[in-house]
């Protein structure tokens, strides 16, 4: 079985400050990890992924995420937040050792960036 | 390039009525999925189709049926709607995971269903 935990329902930051959205995961095989963003009344959009290689991965809109195998974490980060980053963020995991392709999502974290 | 298209976007049903949510993708993807999104519960997988001709149950399949009509289309049917099925439904697709493909999902805009 695989699972994802996003421990914070809500994260509030001021514009220009760094932001972190936390994610921890559990999977029996190789973890394929993803972050998605959802704007109001829209579908989810893929932001970035970790498959293998460098622990720091870069994605769209200036976001990056740090993979930590020992802590089974994949936290989303951005050095300087924008008001337009305000949205709902989902972390997801898939077992890279199977071809079933089923991704399990966390419950989501609402990011609010205040001017 | 439309990506993943879902219809209808909104629907109100009475308890016991049936309906089908349609999903089509034009990205030549092999795998398609139906998720439901409820407040505070993230996305839960209802059914998926790893490739044309196959379908499998996900985490919450009860009360739903699916049909993989062809490579492009994957429909979700509610035979007898219940208030507990009030939700936002998302269709997603990806190239069949494996090899160099890592399986990130492409989502439709969602179908908001209310069952009274």
Image (tube, grey):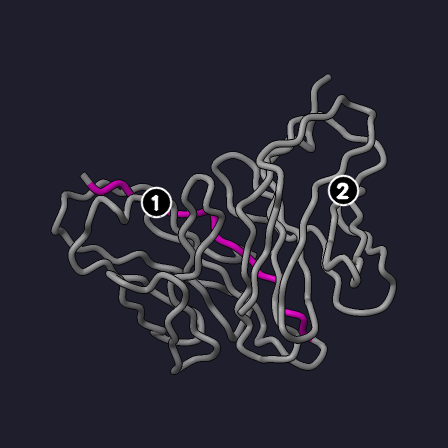
Q: What span is colored magenta in the figure?
A: B101-115
Residue B31 location (% of width, % of height): 50, 72
At label 2, counting other C-alpha atoms closer than 10 Å, the crowd grade (few under 14, some 14-19, many 20 or more) is few
Left or right of A23? Residue B52 is: left
Displayed quadrant of residue A50:
bottom right
Question: On residue A9, which mark appears?
Answer: none
The span from disc 2 to disc 1 (Cα, nearest Å) is 29 Å
Question: On residue A61, which mark appears?
Answer: 2
Chain bearing tag 2 is A
Displayed quadrant of residue B91:
bottom left
Residue A84 location (% of width, % of height): 68, 29
Of A66 and B21, nearer the camera is A66
Residue B81 location (% of width, % of height): 19, 52
Left or right of B55? Residue A25 is: right
Residue drawn at 82 percent across, 56 percent down: A57
Q: Which residue is the extreme one toward the front?
A: A70
Residue A42 location (% of width, % of height): 51, 41
Left or right of B116? Residue B70 is: right
Tell me if residue A103 is in the magenta stretch: no
Residue drawn at 41 percent across, 67 percent down: B58
Displayed quadrant of residue B100:
bottom right
Residue drawn at 67 percent across, 53 percent down: A24
Label 1 sits on residue: B87
């Amino acid at each position: 079985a695989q699972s994802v935990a996003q421990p914070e329902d809500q994260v509030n930051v001021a514009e220009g400050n760094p932001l972190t959205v936390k994610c921890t995961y559990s999977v029996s095989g190789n973890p394929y990890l993803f972050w998605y963003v959802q704007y109001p009344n829209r579908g989810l959009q893929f932001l970035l992924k970790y498959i293998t290689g460098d622990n720091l991965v870069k994605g769209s809109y200036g976001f990056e995420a740090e993979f930590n195998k020992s802590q089974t974490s994949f936290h989303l980060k951005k050095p300087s937040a924008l008001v337009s980053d305000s949205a709902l963020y989902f972390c997801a995991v898939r077992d890279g050792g199977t071809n079933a392709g089923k991704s399990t999502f966390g419950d989501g974290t609402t990011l609010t960036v205040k001017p | 390039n439309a990506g993943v298209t879902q219809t209808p976007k909104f629907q109100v049903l009475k308890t016991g009525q049936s309906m089908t949510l349609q999903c089509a993708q034009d990205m030549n993807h092999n795998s398609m999925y139906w998720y439901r999104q409820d407040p505070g519960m993230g996305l839960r997988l209802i059914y998926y189709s790893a490739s044309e001709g196959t379908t499998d149950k996900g985490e919450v399949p009860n009360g739903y049926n699916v049909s993989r009509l062809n490579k492009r289309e994957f429909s979700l049917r509610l035979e007898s709607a219940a208030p507990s099925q009030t939700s936002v439904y998302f269709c997603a697709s990806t190239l069949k995971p494996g090899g160099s493909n890592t399986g990130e999902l492409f989502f439709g805009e969602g179908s908001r269903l209310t069952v009274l």
